[in-house]
Amino acid sequence: MTTDETPGRSQAPVPDSAGDDSDLRGARSAAHQGDWRTAAWLLAGTADPDLRWERAYVLAEATQDSRGWLDAWLAAAPDSRDARGVQALAAVVGAWALRGSGWAVDHPEEFRRAVPEAAAACREASRLAPDDVVPLVGLLILARVEPAPRAEVDRRFAAVRALAPWHLGAHEQVLQYLCAKWHGSTDQMFAFARGAAGAAPEGSPLNLLVAIAQIEHILALARSDQAEFERYRLSDPVRAELWAAGRRWTTNQSAYARAWGHNVMAGATYLTDQNDLLAYHLAQMGSVLLHWPWEMISGRGAAAAYEKALGWSRSHPPAARQTAAQGRPGSTGP
């Protein structure tokens, strides 16, 4: 594994937040053409809290390119819980766009105004639909940049868990809040990830929270201490924890959850030079490339990081084919 990239002919699929959720991609495409009814039909028929959250968020992202379809939806159905949920997340996405992806805020004045407006939109959407996780997770996203105190984050998290105890999106947002780069520490991040994974049902995507924490920590070391970065990422305990996380996760989930899990595990096993597992997860990803974790791994973007991982995997054949199943979802290992 290396952290430098050289430009070349692209072998990567186009990264897409919708993953391989064909219904979501269809609704987003229709929205871009001004049709809100397909999105309304999709969300009305999505009961699973994790899938509902992901679909609403991707549709909210679509408003950054064209807003007219959402405005038309709100005009036709002003009290629609689904329309209000997407509207709230659109405000969250818009606020983050003003912030930018770097350490410094790109548009500080606009950002300072946008964050409380987005929080108000989430609270209003939650008032209209108190049993919907969508605006509640939106508030967890905003907690990092308001910034909300830990007690308030715990309160928001508890509100989500009262509706959906194993909600992946909510757990991801709390883990991010607890990262050292935001409002926590490495110890707090790992304690939360390991505690949630340990309590989660076998097969739950929450078992991969430890892989997210490892990715965060390994990349933090890459920025601060190259020697410790190399020692840590190749250490047996790190590799063993990733192997165990993969065993407890299952792919018998929604299309998005499968794509998410394989992208996370491919990123983690690339960073730790575990090519048996990397080759497996890259193969299972197929043409479904998500933005995270690849955009964190490479400053050149998700496609560049994917290409680097694919190239490294092809140049480092698995050392022992008989061990390639170790750490795959549902495998029994040695």
Image (cartoon, grey):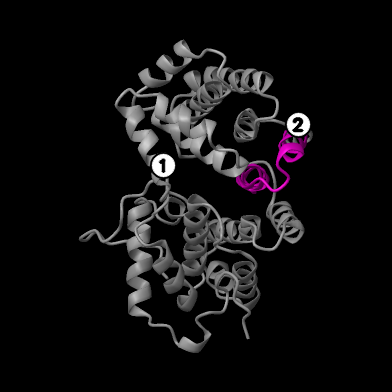
Residue positioned most to the left: 9
- Residue 282 rendering spot, x and y as whole percentages: 41, 67
> Would you say residue 63 is visible in this rendering?
no
Q: Nearer the viewer, mark 1 or mark 2?
A: 1
> Would you say residue 207 is visible in this rendering?
yes
Which residue is disc 2 drawn over? 152
Give the residue at x 59% y 19%. 121
Residue type (three-letter) at the residue carrying disc 2 = Glu
Q: Residue 271 or 74: which is nearer the viewer?
A: 74
Q: Mark 1 touching mark 2, by CB under 8 A?
A: no
How packed mark 2 is, by other alpha carbons closer than 10 Å (few <14, some 14-19, many 20 or more), is: few
Element under disc 1:
helix
Residue type (three-letter) at the residue carrying disc 1 = Asp
* Main SS category, magenta section: helix
Q: Magenta segment range?
A: 154-181
Which residue is disc 1 drawn over? 23
Does the stretch in magenta take in 264?
Answer: no
- Residue 298 rendering spot, x and y as whole percentages: 40, 55
Question: Residue 228 got which mark?
Answer: none
Q: Is residue 12 left or right of residue 210?
A: left
Q: Is residue 193 left or right of residue 254?
A: right
Element under disc 2:
helix
Q: Residue 176 or 44: which is nearer the viewer?
A: 44
- Asked which quadrant contains residue 61, the reply is top left
Q: Earlier in the sequence, mark 1 or mark 2?
A: 1
18, above or below 130, in the image: below
